[in-house]
Image (cartoon, grey):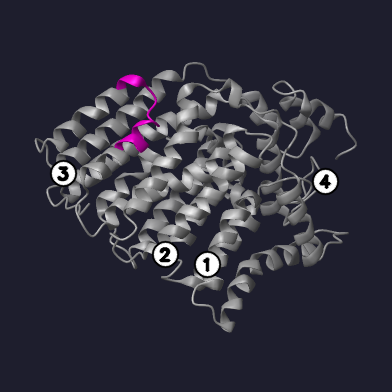
């Protein structure tokens, strides 16, 4: 899809981008006020605040560190929310910061990838529209780290051949500093870097991959009194969690999902794999071997969720859905030939199934049909895509009705690790009452 948007001036580009950010920001503020405080959210938020203010990686709630005690979120996953709380002591703004952190990382990644790939400036208009597409996207407001991990994982994939050392290091950051559950797909990347045109010097790639783990254990040993782990015991714990603990004690949710959720989590990834496979030989600056790696790395997460995970919690579908959305946004701009009708239909099927209403899905088909009939130019089709993306966010805005008043909670949680904060949180979830009555400080 050789995209040329010369007809879109810089002023028009900036105007569109400001409109997108404004509409998205309204949704984020409304949704942030609509979500009740959650145990996992404050578990990782208290982690992050303590990390930034005390250089202490131990949670007051669980008395364990990031990536320990069954926790799957690492320090980089909570950067945005932690800074938001430290700066504002306001839960709504904290959640906004939590979303903004991976969003800014993704935009910075696109700027960096411009060194190696064709990044049309129209591509920078896409992130505000796609970050609200994944199922349970609002989990990015909860300090959970899936989106941050997905961004770094995506960048690692894109740098496989362009900057392999950086790719290996980013894969390590994804696993050890954002989400442990990215371990399997990241091992696919490291396996490719190590075994492709194998030479003895290739063993440096696993070493670079594990470098963030060494760094993290070093930080813990320096900052945490009584920390008795070494790198080997840490990796053994990681192995046990990743390969023997297939459930976190939650029942499968699949039986309660709507047909839309099933299509988005079960069918759209297959559409993405088909699109990538079909175009594996038609990409500029991306080898067909790399495309196979992209498919396999995300396929293992897909198969893990549907075949091995006892939990099947919709949040865990983001480990393959979010990277695939990033790939399906980026790859069409790298095609060396014009997209054919099958490509357009696959892209349409993939993205429209994530829209928030049946009416928008039907509306999205109209410009596609006109484009396939050669009655609509590519530029105008892409402008229709932008309009549909904005309408999707506006529709999501209209669906958010009630919001909570967090003023009392904000006041009680000025010291977020305090018992007073836990008692205030107990108004929303009983788990916090047990924590407040415990012997924790």
Q: Secondary structure at mark 3?
A: helix
User: What's the magenta region?
Assistant: 348-359
Q: Residue at x 71, y 31 (%)?
A: 250
Q: Residue at x 36, y 66 (%)?
A: 287
Q: Earlier in the sequence, mark 4 or mark 3?
A: 4
**Separation of disc 4 and disc 2 at Cα?**
44 Å
**Residue 55 spot, x, y in % from top left:** 72, 57
Q: Secondary structure at mark 2?
A: helix
Q: Is residue 386 magenta?
A: no
Asked if disc 4 and disc 2 are in contact, CB closer than 8 Å, the reply is no
Q: Earlier in the sequence, mark 1 or mark 3?
A: 1
Q: Relative to 402, is 109 above or below?
A: below
Q: Earlier in the sequence, mark 4 or mark 2?
A: 4
Q: Nearer the viewer, mark 4 or mark 2?
A: 2
Is residue 403 or residue 273 the one in the foreground? 273
**Separation of disc 1 and disc 4 at Cα?**
38 Å
Q: Residue at x 21, y 47 (%)?
A: 340
Q: Relative to 253, is 159 above or below?
A: below
**Separation of disc 2 and disc 3 at Cα?**
31 Å
Q: Secondary structure at mark 1?
A: helix
Q: Nearer the viewer, mark 2 or mark 3?
A: 2
């Amino acid at each position: 899809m050789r995209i040329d948007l010369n007809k879109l001036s810089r002023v028009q580009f900036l105007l569109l981008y400001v409109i997108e950010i404004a509409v998205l920001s309204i949704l984020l503020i409304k949704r942030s006020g609509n979500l009740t405080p959650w145990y996992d959210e404050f578990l990782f938020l208290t982690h992050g605040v303590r990390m930034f203010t005390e250089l202490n990686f131990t949670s007051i709630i669980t008395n364990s560190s990031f990536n320990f005690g069954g926790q799957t979120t690492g320090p980089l996953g909570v950067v945005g929310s932690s800074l938001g709380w430290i700066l504002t002591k306001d839960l709504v703004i904290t959640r906004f910061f939590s979303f903004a952190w991976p969003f800014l990382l993704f935009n910075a990644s696109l700027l960096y990838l411009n060194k190696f790939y064709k990044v049309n400036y129209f591509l920078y208009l896409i992130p505000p529209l796609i970050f609200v597409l994944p199922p349970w996207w609002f989990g990015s407001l909860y300090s959970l780290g899936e989106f941050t991990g997905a961004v770094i994982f995506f960048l690692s994939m894109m740098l496989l051949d362009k900057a392999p050392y950086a790719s290996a290091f980013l894969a390590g950051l994804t696993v050890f500093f954002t989400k442990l559950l990215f371990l399997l797909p990241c091992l696919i990347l490291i396996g490719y870097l190590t075994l492709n045109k194998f030479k003895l010097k290739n063993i440096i790639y696993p070493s670079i991959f594990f470098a963030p783990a060494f760094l993290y254990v070093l930080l813990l040993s320096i900052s945490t009194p009584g920390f008795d782990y070494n790198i080997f015991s840490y990796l053994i714990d990681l192995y046990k969690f990743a390969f023997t603990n297939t459930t976190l004690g939650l029942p499968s949710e699949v039986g309660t999902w709507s047909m839309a959720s099933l299509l988005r989590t079960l069918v759209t990834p297959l559409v993405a794999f088909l699109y990538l496979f079909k175009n594996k030989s038609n990409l500029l600056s991306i080898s067909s071997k790399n495309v196979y790696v992209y498919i396999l790395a995300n396929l293992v997460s897909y198969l893990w969720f549907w075949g091995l995970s006892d939990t099947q919690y919709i949040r865990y579908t983001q480990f393959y859905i979010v990277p695939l959305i990033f790939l399906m946004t980026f790859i069409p701009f790298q095609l060396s030939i014009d997209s054919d009708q099958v490509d357009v239909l696959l892209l349409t099927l993939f993205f429209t199934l994530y829209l928030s209403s049946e009416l928008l899905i039907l509306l999205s088909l109209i410009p596609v049909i006109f484009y396939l009939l050669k009655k609509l130019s590519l530029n105008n089709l892409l402008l229709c895509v932008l309009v549909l993306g904005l309408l999707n966010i506006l529709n999501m805005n209209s669906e958010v009705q009630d919001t909570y008043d967090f003023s009392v909670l904000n006041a009680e949680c000025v010291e977020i690790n305090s018992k007073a904060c836990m008692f205030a949180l107990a108004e929303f979830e009983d788990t916090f009452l047990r924590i407040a009555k415990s012997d924790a400080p």
